[in-house]
Amino acid sequence: MTLRRLALATAAFAAFAAPALAADTVKLGYQLPLTGDTAQYGQDFRKAAEIALDEFNAAGKPFKVEIVFEDSRSDAKEGTNIARKFVDDKAIVGVLGDFTSGVSMASAQVYKEAGLAQLSQTASHPDYTKISKYQFRNIATQAQEGPYNAQWMASKGYKNVAVIAEQTDWGQSVVGGYSEAVKAGGGTVAFSEFFNRGLKDYRSLISKIERAKPDAIYTGFFYEDGAQFLKQLQQLGVKTPVYSTSAAYSPKLIELAGDAAEGVRLTSNFLPTDPAPNVQHFVTEWKKRSADAVPGQFPAQAYDAVRIMLAAVEKAQPNPTREKVRDALAQTTDFPGVTGKTTFNAEREPVKELVKVEVKGGAFVPVAE
């Protein structure tokens, strides 16, 4: 064969082979807030997702995975637009996100109609997975956390409680899930109120809580609002015990609140001090990309969510379709994540174990009681 013919044959083969090589890449979508008031969470989710993706693609699998990240800005309308974009891209076989329950639920209506599986790392509103068979989550809901914390606080003798939470769908589920459990257990909700996310001055709210004279305060907030609230409690000399949900579990809470965070108790399913090899591996990889910062629960949730989705894609091989990926997700059993083992029940809810945590000596430590 002449050199010219060899060159032509090689070019023809390359042109023929290119589509086959492209077919060896599977696409996923990830909608998350990369700008706006909650961008810090979305940036963390993306970093955790990239760790999981890099590990998967370096593992010698017969195919690669690409994740398309889109910025929802924690806006329901934008999240819905992204969902339509992902649905229209026929190469995308599964999606992750969003951050808030409200945006996740708005987007879910699009995924429901298109038959595209959606796995959220943090949407904890009880109604999210009720939308359709295509919605999954790997975080405990307030229907689980509320009763768990109500029982925990009752065991400490706190029968008369004040409840506050941010004015969102998620915040309403915090108050609802917890308050119902308190009343069912014979306790009393002395005071209940919502606040706007990003509130700077909690003094009037704290005054109302003081007048109600509760045994303890139960809160539904993220670390920024939590730190502000705790500092102002300390400034006003309020000593009432404070409990919270896993949403407040972040090293940033202690960093921002300082010693005002001391004694706060909350639930979590991730502890960076856990000696388990998979946990320490994730902590090490996170520190490499985060100027040695320690990860909180939400990055760990995202890391596990992506790995669960990747495992479903692998199980759906060869030629994974949207329906095959959905079915593979539904079959997830005892997935060994850094937030504990995850099994999806018939309602696509995760069966998770919660850990009791207290801020002690400027660090989160597990508590037995």
Image (spheres, grey):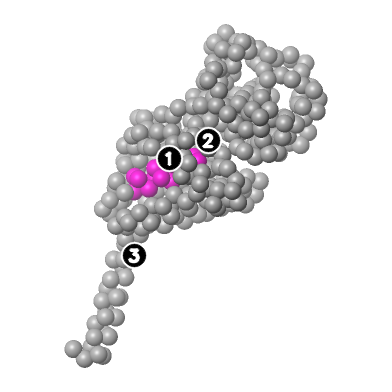
Q: Quarter of the image containing the N terminus?
A: bottom left
Does 258 sit left or right of 90 as displayed? right
Q: Quarter of the image containing the C terminus?
A: top right
Location of residue 151 with respect to 67 vertically, above or below: above
**Which mark is drawn over residue 72?**
none
Residue displayed at 60% across by 37% down: 250
Is residue 128 among what the camera can see? Answer: no
Residue displayed at 56% across by 12% down: 155
What range is drawn magenta here? 300-313
**Residue that label 3 marks:** 22
**Residue that label 1 marks:** 277
Q: Residues within 10 Å of mark 2 (few under 14, many from 20)?
A: few
Q: How far separated are the C-alphas under marks 2 and 3?
A: 41 Å
Q: Residues within 10 Å of mark 1 (few under 14, many from 20)?
A: few
Residue displayed at 62% across by 38% down: 251
Q: How far separated are the C-alphas under marks 3 and 1?
A: 35 Å
Q: Earlier in the sequence, mark 3 or mark 1?
A: 3
Does 91 sit left or right of 210 as displayed? left
Query: Magenta span: helix, strand or loop, mainly?
Result: helix
**Residue that label 2 marks:** 273
Does 210 sit left or right of 315 as displayed? right
